[in-house]
């Protein structure tokens, strides 16, 4: 059996697959907010950061790993696991001193991971993908490379606030002594893989491309980007490597403590979006994936090289080879939750509000759906902008507000994905909110494309399990035919009469964005 782990913003999830029976053999999750409440991170990050800073406590991820394996061990036979791979929320980084490797090599199963590894942290908290605090550092890196086009040509993205390079530069400027003490900088994905393998792990091209440091032509760290970011950085970075590279045997800590077999191996971890590309069966061009998780993302395998002229899109490594394009929207589920709570609804009432209660109002109201800072387009003010035929004064129909929010989110997505030039013939939908029929129907209507959903809700963890099986020699395309099958009852068709309605809304939405945001 093969195990996939996904260390995402709000939870750590495991999916175990059995390729012989073609079945999912087990699934299990640890929610950071509810299962580890003493970290005071109800949505997986430390609330209230100043100046756009959003950090998480890496000890929470370690505690979650121990807890996940104890839980998993009660429902599945971990002794059957032959290979583990995984994914992590992208861009987040963990800073460690020169004791990290020896601590990993000598982990004692009688003690927790946190007790043994946290003394190696040189930065108490980890910046994560929601962080927008590095505008100055992005400008400095861009200037050193003579402009955004050159940064984008080399790394697949212009300098982006949440990307790891600008975050590393900020740490170096804020605390040069701690930067100096740092011997290794890991992504969330390579940090978790290191712990499981009991030795520092490499960074895969999928996640490594989200750092503004990897040269996509050479697949090596780019010397000019490195020196524009921070001194001595090359020695602190794990080397880049292809997804599925086997790191070695699982650490004896997990054998003795959690019953994994001694011959179980660990493959490189990747980013949650590249893993999801695998889990959604979308590694070959043709399928568009929309993931409605904490962030909303829109991604697809790339038939050829292309970058976003406006600078919002990114190019990451495709774990099956080649590249994928991606756009990320920060106001995903957290914005939907904010409106749900403001209106006092639960998810099923939200679902009804989106669908049946507001059907006659399709395209009638416009909302810029930003309840917190947004990255696509870049926008720091908080609070949705509303413009519409019907009034949005307090007390306006909940259905109208819910519909306007969702339409705004998907119009924004449609507008900012045009550069990819991938026809939306069929959309595969995943992430926590994809099970909501009202939300899924609005995706179909706004994009005027059929929407498919798969059985497994965590496509990143499934993708990681498939990457593990492929690393052990199984055929990835065959595995995808078995495990990445759309649920027959869960397909949704677009309402054709709404095609022209949303075509018109798209132009109005773009105009409202231009009026409101500095860089739309
Ligand atoms: P991540 O992997 O980024 O941590 P998930 O893909 O697990 O996130 O999605 C979690 C989010 O899904 C929650 O924050 C919640 O807002 C949303 N969600 C869960 N159930 C529903 C539902 N029935 N309708 C809409 N959104 C939902
Ligand atoms: C992608 C991004 C997010 C994170 C968290 O660029 O920032 O999707 O990977 O899921």
Image: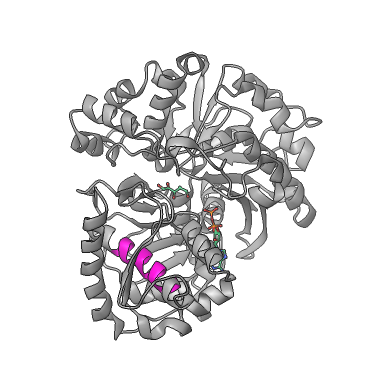
User: Considering only vertical position in the picture, is 517 above or below 398?
Assistant: above
Task: Based on the picture, tell me whether residue 297 belongs to the magenta stretch.
Answer: no
Res. 165 image quadrant: top left
* Residue most extreme to the right: 110
Image coordinates of residue 461 in percent, x first then y, are 56, 53
Image coordinates of residue 320 in percent, x first then y, are 41, 50
Asked whether the viewer can see residue 93, the reply is: yes
Asked whether the viewer can see residue 431, the reply is: no
User: Considering only vertical position in the picture, is 510 above or below 228?
Assistant: below
In depth, the one of 324 and 34 nearer the eye is: 34
Identify which residue is drawn at 40% across, 67% down.
405
Q: Judge from the rendering whether residue 37 lies leftward or rightward of residue 448; answer left or right.
A: right
Q: Judge from the rendering whether residue 397 lies leftward or rightward of residue 416; answer left or right.
A: right
Identify which residue is drawn at 26% across, 72% down.
505
State whether the magenta stretch is mostly helix, strand or loop.
Answer: helix
Res. 251 image quadrant: top right
Identify which residue is drawn at 75% across, 33% down.
112
User: Considering only vertical position in the picture, is 432 above or below 205?
Assistant: below
Chain part drawn in magenta? 402-414
Task: Based on the picture, tell me whether residue 408 belongs to the magenta stretch.
Answer: yes
Image coordinates of residue 308 in percent, x first then y, are 23, 49
């Amino acid at each position: 059996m093969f195990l996939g782990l996904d260390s995402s913003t709000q939870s750590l999830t495991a999916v175990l697959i059995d390729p012989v029976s073609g079945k999912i053999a087990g699934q299990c999750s640890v929610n950071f907010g509810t299962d580890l409440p003493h970290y005071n991170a109800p949505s997986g990050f430390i609330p209230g950061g100043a100046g756009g800073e959003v950090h998480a406590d890496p000890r929470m991820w370690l505690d979650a790993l121990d807890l996940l394996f104890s839980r998993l061990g009660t429902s599945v036979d971990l002794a059957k696991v032959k290979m583990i791979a995984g994914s992590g929320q992208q861009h987040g980084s963990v800073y460690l001193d020169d004791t990290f490797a020896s601590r990993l090599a000598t982990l004692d199963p009688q003690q927790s991971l946190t007790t043994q590894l946290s003394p190696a942290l040189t930065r108490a908290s980890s910046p994560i993908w929601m962080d927008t605090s590095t505008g100055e550092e992005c400008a400095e890196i861009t200037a050193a490379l003579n402009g955004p086009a050159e940064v984008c040509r080399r790394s697949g993205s212009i300098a982006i606030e949440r990307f790891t390079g600008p975050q590393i530069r900020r740490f170096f400027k804020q605390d040069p002594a701690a930067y100096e003490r740092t011997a290794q900088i890991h992504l969330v994905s390579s940090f978790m893989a290191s712990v499981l393998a009991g030795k520092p792990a490499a960074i895969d091209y999928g996640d490594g491309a989200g750092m503004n440091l990897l040269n996509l032509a050479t697949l090596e760290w780019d010397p000019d980007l490195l020196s524009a970011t921070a001194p001595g950085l090359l020695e602190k970075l794990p080397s880049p490597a292809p997804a599925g590279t086997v790191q070695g045997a699982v650490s004896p800590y997990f054998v003795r403590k959690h019953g994994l077999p001694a011959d179980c191996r660990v493959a490189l971890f990747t980013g949650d979006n590249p893993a999801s590309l695998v889990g959604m069966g979308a590694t070959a061009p043709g399928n568009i994936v929309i993931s409605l998780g904490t962030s909303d993302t829109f991604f697809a395998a790339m038939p050829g090289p292309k970058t976003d002229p406006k600078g919002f899109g990114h190019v990451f490594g495709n774990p099956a080879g080649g590249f994928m394009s991606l756009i990320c929207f920060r106001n995903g589920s957290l914005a939907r939750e904010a409106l749900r709570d403001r209106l006092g609804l639960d998810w099923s009432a939200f679902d009804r509000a989106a669908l049946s209660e507001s059907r006659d109002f399709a395209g009638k109201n416009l909302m810029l759906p930003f309840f917190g800072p947004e990255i696509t387009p870049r926008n720091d003010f908080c609070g949705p902008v509303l413009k519409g035929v019907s009034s949005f004064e307090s007390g306006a129909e909940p259905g109208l507000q819910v519909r306007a929010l969702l339409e705004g989110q998907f119009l924004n997505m449609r507008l900012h994905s045009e550069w990819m030039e991938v026809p939306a013939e069929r959309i595969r939908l995943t992430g926590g909110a994809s099970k909501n029929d009202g939300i899924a129907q609005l995706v179909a209507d706004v994009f005027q494309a059929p929407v498919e959903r798969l059985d497994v809700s965590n496509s990143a963890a499934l993708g990681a399990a498939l990457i593990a099986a492929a690393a052990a020699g199984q055929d990835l395309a065959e595995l995808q035919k078995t495990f990445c099958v759309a649920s027959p009852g869960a397909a949704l068709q677009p309402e054709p009469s709404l095609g022209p309605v949303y075509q018109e809304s798209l132009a109005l939405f773009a105009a409202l964005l231009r009026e409101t945001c500095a860089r739309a």
